[in-house]
Amino acid sequence: MGQQNMLKIIKAKKLIGEINIPGDKSISHRAVMLGAIAEGETVINNFLMGEDCLATINCFKEMGIEIEMSNKGKIIIKGKGIRGVTKPKKILDVSNSGTTIRLISGILAGQEFETTITGDASIQKRPMKRIAEPLFRMGAIIEGSEGIEGVGGRRGTGEIYPPLKIKGGKLRPTEYKMPVASAQVKSCVLLAGLYADGKTTVIEPGPSRDHTERMLMHFGAKIEISGNKISVHGPASLEGGEIDVPGDISSAAFFLVAGLLVPGSDLLLRNVGMNPTRIGIIEVLHRMGAKLEIMDEEIISEEPRANIRVTSSEKRVTGIEIGGELIPKLIDEIPIIAVLATQAEGTTIIKDAKELRVKESDRIKTISTELKKMGAAIEETEDGMIITGPTKLKGATINSYRDHRVAMSMAIAGLIADGETIIEDTECIKTSFPGFEDILNRISG
């Protein structure tokens, strides 16, 4: 099906099999960060060996943390406590990982040294004022490539971008009201709050993924949650332990949609994370009329998980409107939802998703452009898209924009398109789903 940096997809007759979903990306990142600043050993099972999460590991290794890796996704971290990281000898490089740069900045803000952190060309276009603002209030100095935030400098009025220079130190607790719901910003502030003397509170306008809060509890931090107010008490002392990472629902989403769309399909997805702040995709599939069987639910390491069985149906799913508080629960799944919407009866409207414009690519533009090449009736709006279905898709040569979710979504579209679909620049898939192509080959026989 593929050759280096390119994926060739032909129409699938049916998809059959069981899939072990790789570890959740968000949880894998956080487990490394908290394991590194906890006292003693932390063991992480089912860690996602994707490039983004490996970038987080590399950053902590640069700061003197000993981390052992086995190829089976088991990671052992020798934590050195909250003040145990040391000044890196070189600039920290997060590669393509927005989660790494935004979350680690909260930890760096609490250190007594200055750090410079950067990433690839895509990261250098990602807005960072959203984290610089609250960290500045807490007493850190953050300088970015366009404007300065911080004490003694001018308060930058414009946006700032990586590379970021972070001068940490003694942090003050703060109460920060977030302008938009963002798990990355919330997590950054809560991690910085571990170093502040007193109670740091984040107030969310709507719920965003809560992996950080759950994991902080798991490591023994003092957390208070009251509605949309989350507080952490510092200075904190965290204790290492064992973490079992569930499969990533954002990765499962590609195969949930594939199983619905390819006739005669029957897929069992094992160990899928079912965190209530992440299951917007399940809600949307139910509302569109899809039949999913959710089985064997359990909670391990504070995180719920289950097995999901998906079978194709004779009856088409129905177009719906998706927006509001649902968006943060499925922001990463919107590209694959757009693919599903091309086959739905009627119109699907996706709105309130402007955040998609500042992901690895401008996902509103990129997914609309590429689906149009395949014959989809899709219209780009400022904060989302309008998709009218059902339309017959035809194979095309697709630009991935080096965005893993665009590449995988278009691969699934290729499974139902007439002719051959070629997706260029697919190296990016390793960011979040190493082995994606192998699974595709196996289940399509």
Image (cartoon, rainbow, N blue to C red):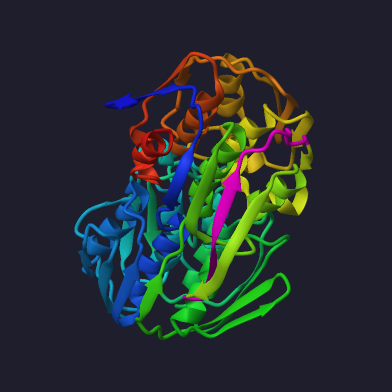
Q: Nearer the viewer, residue 98 or 366?
A: 366
Position of residue 403 measured from the top left corner of the image (x, y, whole percent):
45, 34
Residue 108 visible in image: yes
Position of residue 271 measured from the top left corner of the image (x, y, whole percent):
47, 61
Relative to 37, 63 lies left or right: left
Q: Residue at x 34, y 49 (%)?
A: 50
Bounds of the magenta segment: 301-319
Q: Find out whether residue 149 is within the magenta segment.
A: no
Relative to 329, 129 lies left or right: left
24 w.r.t. 365: above or below: below
434 w.r.t. 401: above or below: below
Relative to 415, 443 lies left or right: left
Q: Quadrant of residue 337?
A: top right
Position of residue 108 measured from the top left corner of the image (x, y, whole percent):
38, 65
Q: Residue at x 26, y 59 (%)?
A: 72
Q: Nearer the viewer, residue 140 or 271?
A: 271
Q: Nearer the viewer, residue 294 or 119?
A: 294
Point out the image quarter for the C terminus.
Answer: top left
